[in-house]
Amino acid sequence: MSGPDDPGGDAGRLRVSVVLPAYNEADSLEGTVRTTVATLEGFLGADEFEVIVAEDGCDDRTPEIADRLAREDDRVRHVHSDERLGRGGALEYAFARAGGETLVYFDTDLATDMRHLAELVDAIEGDGYDVATGSRWLPGNRADRPAKRGVPSRAYNRLVRGVLGSDLRDHQCGFKALSRAAFEDLREAVEDEHWFWDTELLVRAQRRGLRVAEFPVEWKPKGDSKVDLVRDVFGMGSQIVRLWYQLSVSPRITRTRTVAAGAALTLAALALMTVYLNPAAVLAAFEGANPVPVALATLVYVVSWPLRGLRYRDVLKELGYRETVGFLTGAVFISQTGNLVFPARAGDAVRAYVVKARRGIPYPTGFASLAAERVFDLLTITAMAGAVLAGLLLTDGTGAVATAVSGNVPGVSAAAVSTAVRVAAAVGVAAVASLLVIVATARSDRSYVRAVVSRVSTDSYVEYVVGVVEEFAAGVQTVAGSRGSFLRVGGVSVVVWALDVATALLVLSAFPAAAAAMSPAQLIVVGFFAVSVGNLAKVLPLSPGGIGLYEAAFTALVVGLGGVPAAVAFAAAVLDHAVKNVVTVGGGVAAMVGLNVSLTAAVDETEALEETEAETEPDLETADLTDD
């Protein structure tokens, strides 16, 4: 039979190549191949076609059956892969080695009535379409579509039409054909290697102006089908977002628009401060405070940022990446500015994007470094809060603590205080639990990720998802599970948060009433506890930047433990948060300008990095892939 570089005959002589993607199809493969050959013989010459079994790393008798069928009929070929390429990957690999001018594929279960095969081929050969696809949702079709299949399918196709702008009704029908020229035009552009391959092929074909035919088919489901969490939600959903960004967002990004977006981001961050806080209270806070301690507090907080960059450098160093403190400080500034605007701490994703685009750090590593950083943040402030709380309880401060956390503070919402304290306690417990899990799993050779993901899905996406999650988990374990890195990164975290507390203490001392109510020692104790609990309270994305929760916790604790008037405590909380947010936004803008973090440049550099990575990957031609 033909070797892996041989298309299986004279490419100019063959009219049609039919590819059958096969994974563990031992029970149905022989019947499918014989039916396909017989159907092709009905409207093509005996030597004008070939049938290729694209066997994708099967672990049953499918390879043996494909070999036997290829020996019995020289129009049947078997393309084998020792490792799973994914449905799309297997199709692309087989098409590249096919000899036909018209390339066809359909599912081996023959759910689509084979009388449509001639119509499918004729759409390419006779009508001159570049791509053709059967449809189960066009008027005139006959599709026995049970609700458990039909509802998800309709929802998916509507999503593709709405988000990706496709004109087609059915993107996933496993009954398609395309010309050799269309395949060569699209093969490098289509990135997905799994179930989304079909959809991306059709969407990109339409975007490139190729002629796409969609015609109704008679379709009857074979076997059972169910929603697969990994394939349908993670796989298909993330690929829709990825393709939308590449087709609709990336081409519209220019330097002018990037600068405008940065300015809008800055204004939004500042505006949100006035939405969640009373603007009059913010102005009153500035008017009632001594400007000298406030200015000093601002300087102290600015000094803490290079330390954040230093800590991030140490985290990435543990993961095998060496970067400058200046660049990483800017990346942290940009991501934290994003967190003031975007919900659910989506600004963290911005940092992962920046380090990927500008320095080639993979996304799993980028997110792992962020997760490790967050673990150290939470552990540090939890330890600070726990130490102060223990000291207060040991020195008979039980009553004051109870008053503070109960929300029984004049002028402060009891509901807000209760929410803030509950969130803070839950986050602190979760931080400690997370560390214990990280340490325990780091010492185990078992892949807990694979065990969990495999329970919810057996799809080919599983290997991809497991690989990404395991890379992420390994990164977190490397940083938090090693004694040396734990002490080094943890030590810098203590200094970072000590400066954060110092900023709050200086702001608090700027108010005469607060300074008069507490001694310096009491001011330090109360400040540490208030800032720690306040920061734990704002971890959950209940409001942008934690605005509101931080103030509630800070005010209640300063009033309850320090005897400071509620209005003064609230003003100090507002001013403290305002100082930190203004420094963050200012640093974010400076970083965007200083580092020239243009999305256009980032996208260009990302594409260059991907090309470099592709050049260093093993060549499929020399891998253990054989055409039997």
Image (cartoon, grey):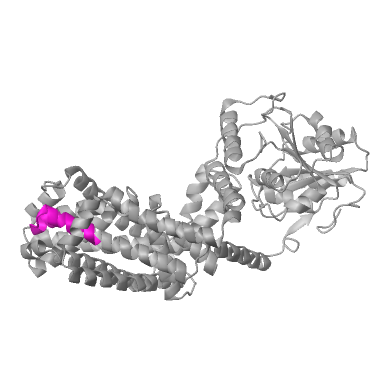
Residue closer to the observer: 200 or 270 = 270
Q: Determine whether, in the image, residue 266 is placed left or right of residue 48.
A: left
Q: Is residue 559 magenta?
A: yes
Say above or below: 30 vs 207: above
Say above or below: 134 vs 351: above
Q: Determine whether, in the image, residue 225 is placed left or right of residue 39.
A: left
Residue closer to the observer: 461 or 358 = 358
Tell me which residue sits at (75%, 45%) in the image. 210
Residue closer to the observer: 216 or 597 = 597
Residue closer to the observer: 581 or 54 = 581
Counting from the top left corner in percent of width and height, residue 555 is at: 17, 54
The magenta segment is 557-576
Q: Quadrant of residue 615?
A: bottom right
Tell me which residue sits at (21%, 50%) in the image. 421
Q: Kindly tell me whether residue 332 is visible in this rendering.
A: no
Q: Determine whether, in the image, residue 280 is placed left or right of residue 62.
A: left
Q: Kindly tell me whether residue 100 is visible in this rendering.
A: yes
Say above or below: 197 vs 358: above
Tell me which residue sits at (20%, 61%) in the image. 286
Q: Is residue 473 magenta?
A: no
Counting from the top left corner in percent of width and height, residue 364 is at: 50, 60
Say above or below: 208 vs 575: above
Counting from the top left corner in percent of width and height, residue 247 is at: 62, 50
Counting from the top left corner in percent of width and height, residue 268 is at: 38, 53
Q: Determine whether, in the image, residue 254 is placed left or right of residue 266.
A: right
Type of secondary structure dominating the magenta stretch: helix
